[in-house]
Amino acid sequence: MKEAFRVIVSSFQALLDSIDKSYCKRLRILGSMFNVNSYVEVLDPEYDALVLDIFHQLLASIQDDLSPLLLAHIESILEGIL
């Protein structure tokens, strides 16, 4: 399970690259993570480093021109982890 979350979090690195052909897939992954509350799985102390990585990746993707829906998903995931 830990490796699956690592792959998901690594996909967040390119959230700002809206030209990339896999951009829509990354948005759906983020939306699914939000809708299913799968981020609750990482609240185990075993996942501390992964939680930090999630925060770094998602916070780095926040910009002024970010779509409101994407921003809402990011905010909800970060709030849910806190």
Image (spheres, rainbow, N blue to C red):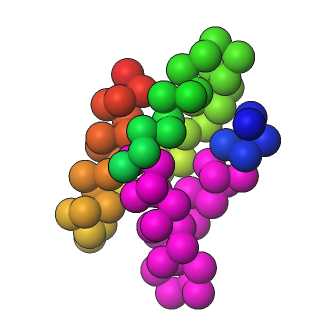
Report whether 22 appears left or right of 65. Answer: right
- The answer to which image quadrant residue 54 occupies is top right
Which residue sits at x=72%, y=52%? 7
Q: Does residue 59 show up?
A: no
Report whether 57 appears left or right of 32. Answer: right
13 drawn magenta: yes
- Furthest residue in direction right, as rendered: 3
Which residue sits at x=25%, y=63%? 69
Vertical placement of 72 versus 47: above or below? below
Give the quarter of the figure containing the C terminus. top left
Which residue sits at x=74%, y=34%? 2
- Furthest residue in direction top, as rendered: 45
Report whether 77 appears left or right of 14. Answer: left
| Image coordinates for residue 70, horizontal then vertical, percent | 32, 61
- Furthest residue in direction front, as rendered: 36
Vertical placement of 20 versus 30: above or below? below
Vertical placement of 9 versus 48: above or below? below
Looking at the picture, tell me which residue is in the foreground, 41 or 77. 41
Which residue sits at x=58%, y=27%? 42
59 drawn magenta: no
Q: How many marks?
A: 0
Q: Magenta stretch mostly in which secondary structure?
A: helix
Residue range highlighted in magenta: 6-34
Report whether 77 appears left or right of 26. Answer: left
| Image coordinates for residue 67, horizontal then vertical, percent | 26, 69
